[in-house]
Image (cartoon, rainbow, N blue to C red):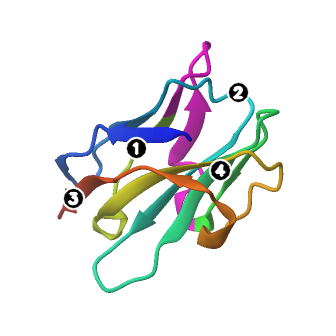
Amino acid sequence: QVQLVESGGASVQTGGSLRLSCVGSGHRLSAYSLAWFRQAPGKEREGVARIRADGMAYYEDSVKDRFTISKDNAETILYLQMKSLKPEDSAVYYCAADPGLACPAYVSGWLYWGQGTQVTVSS
């Protein structure tokens, strides 16, 4: 059982930056596929960024060149560095982990989820 705890969400203005963190309690995350999803009110949860155990990263088109997914050297913390934030980035952000290698963009492909952290970007 992997427990994921996100932090770092906040309210910022358009153009601002935030770094989200996700800690896997009691587990090194090195053997897992990891991802960040987000869900805005009234919308489905969508994949934002994913990283395979080998480090290959994938991004949703709207966040490419603005968001960076990474792990710390000890591979116990997952990060999402966000810059040039826009109001449409406002959502609850969730981290996810899965022992599989597929690293899919869809929600059902992920076994473990955190509780989410709120990001609000004001214009």
Amino acid of disc 2: Ser
Q: Is residue 121 visible?
A: yes
Task: Write down the residue under mark 2.
Answer: 30
Q: Earlier in the sequence, mark 1 or mark 4?
A: 4
Amino acid of disc 4: Arg
Judging depth in this view, the residue of 8 and 62 nearest the camera is 8
Residue 107 higher or lower than 30, as above or below: below
Q: Nearer the viewer, mark 2 or mark 4?
A: 2
Task: Write down the residue under mark 1.
Answer: 83
Judging depth in this view, the residue of 117 and 109 nearest the camera is 109
Q: Earlier in the sequence, mark 2 or mark 4?
A: 2
* The C terminus sits in image quarter: bottom left
Q: Nearer the viewer, mark 1 or mark 2?
A: 2
The quadrant where residue 107 appears: bottom right
Q: CA distance from mark 3 to mark 2?
A: 30 Å
Q: Tell me the number on the disc at residue 57.
A: none
Picture coordinates of residue 10, whole percent (x, y)? 20, 46
Judging depth in this view, the residue of 27 and 84 nearest the camera is 27
Q: Tell me the number on the disc at residue 50.
A: 4
The quadrant where residue 93 appears: bottom left
Picture coordinates of residue 91, whole percent (x, y)? 31, 65
Task: Write down the residue under mark 3.
Answer: 120
Q: CA distance from mark 1 to mark 4?
A: 17 Å
Q: Nearer the viewer, mark 4 or mark 3?
A: 4
Residue drawn at (62%, 57%) of the image: 111
Q: Earlier in the sequence, mark 3 or mark 2?
A: 2
Q: CA distance from mark 1 to mark 2?
A: 25 Å
What secondary structure is found at the residue carrying circle 4?
strand
- Which stretch is magenta? 62-78
Amino acid of disc 3: Thr
Q: CA distance from mark 1 to mark 3?
A: 13 Å
Q: Earlier in the sequence, mark 1 or mark 3?
A: 1
